[in-house]
Every structure is written in structure tokens, then in C-alpha cells.
Image (cartoon, rainbow, N blue to C red):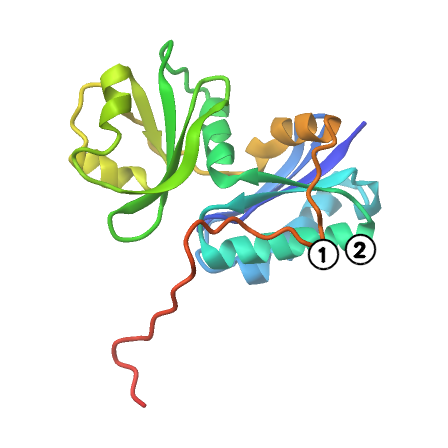
Amino acid sequence: MALILCIETSTTVCSVALARDGRVLVARREDLPNSHSTRLTVLIEELMLEAGLMMDELAAVAVSSGPGSYTGLRIGVSVAKGLCFALQKPLLAFSSLEVLAAAFLQSGNAPEDGALLCPLMDARRMEVYTAFFNSDMQMQGDIHAEIVSGESFAAALQQGPVYFFGDGSDKCRVVLTHPNARFVDEVVPLAAAMAPLAQERLSRKQFEDVAYFEPFYLKTFQATLPRNKVF
């Protein structure tokens, strides 16, 4: 019976879940921004204590690989890799957008036949990270950064209903007025949504190379200085 620790840190929400054979046993989340570095390992410890299980009982560690918050992804992947090295366990990785789409479906949403799912992650200003999925969780096209305008996703919207959700959806809600646009609130990528995905990938032995695996940032990190910085 496969026990998998799932870690999701691609947004301001930091979450972990412990799953056995694709079913969540225990889950934790922290909604405080910038808490990943101090809270992630604490949440994992609390998770294992509540479940009454030891870390060496894990069959694998699963992590959200991006795109998303540069700092959040770096912390999540670093912790996941560290655990895999220490425990000699395989690493499973999932696109943050795939996890977000899974969270949408697992929240009880029932999209119309033939509809597309369009998870949107905030990429600052009027830009989002996105990709299309069908209701069977098959990705349609590539993950990309989209500058949101009234013409965004026009071709997909002409074909049928498109469900927009995630922390980048508010940007689209303002400018996308096509009748096929459907907006769903309060959907976030959570570690618990990884459970069935991780079990399936574990059964196929689709593991990452722990030594060389890196987050998928999509865009390079750009540091900025405070406007009132004095030299």
C-alpha cells in the first residue's frame, strides 16, 4: 500500500498532504503569505504525527514543480529533494497548473461536455501562467505566459465553454466578456489534489532525477529594489 507525501508551494498557500493509494489520509495548509520557509517542514512534521506514521514508511515524495512563485517553488522543491535524498525515495513532480486543474475537478465542479479547463496563475501585472486541459485532465497545448487582454483565449472561447479559475482569474474576469467564459472562485492548487495523480505516476514509475531536478519557473526571476532605497 503506497504512502506518498505531497507538497504544494507554488502560490501564497503552503500545503501538504499524506495519501495512501491515491486517497488523502491527512492534509494541512497555511494561507499566510511568505510562510513557506518557516512553516513547510513544520506542517510535514504535524502531518506525520497526526497520521502516526514514520517518514521511512513513505513510498515517494510528490511536489508541484511550477510555474508559480519563484521563492515558493524553490522552497518546496528543495524540501522534497532533501527528503528524497535522505530517505532514498523517488521524486514525483507535477505542473502547478495540472494540480490546479485537478483541484477544480475534485471540488465538485462539473464542466459542460466538451468544455476546456483553463487554470490561471498570477504572474504579476496583467500576465498569467496558463494551459488548457480537458475534463479528463489531458493537457491541450503548452504551458505559457499570457498577457491578458480582451482578445485572450479568443479561439478557445469561440469553440465552446472555457472554465477560468485560480488566482489569476480576476484579471481575466474584467476583460473577457464572451458568453462562453465561465469563472469559478476559490480554487487553489493544494497538495491534496495531487493524491490520485501521484498514485498513478508512482504505478508507472515516472520518477524525476533527484540530483538534477529543478523547478519550472517559466520566466527568469527578476529582483527589484524598494523605491525608497538609499545608497
> Which residue matches tag 2?
86
Image quadrant where one finds the C terminus: bottom left
- Callout 2, which amino acid? Ala
Secondary structure state at the residue bearing disc 2: helix
Q: Quadrant of residue 89?
A: top right
Secondary structure state at the residue bearing disc 1: helix
Residue at left offset 53%, top offset 53%: 73
> Which residue matches tag 1?
82
Instruction: Look at the picture and state if 125 lies above or below 23.
Output: below
Instruction: Look at the picture and state if 14 lies above or below 195.
Output: below
Image quadrant where one finds the N terminus: top right
- Callout 1, which amino acid? Gly
Please state the horizontal and vertical placement of residue 230, each as a whole percent of the image: 29, 87
Number of the label disc, if any, that sits on residue 99:
none
Q: Are marks 2 and 1 in contact (CB under 8 Å)?
A: yes
Residue at left offset 75%, top offset 42%: 90
Q: CA distance from mark 2 to mark 1?
A: 6 Å
Horizontal arrangement in the rendering, residue 214 relative to residue 205 (left or right):
left
Horizontal arrangement in the rendering, residue 57 relative to residue 136 (left or right):
right
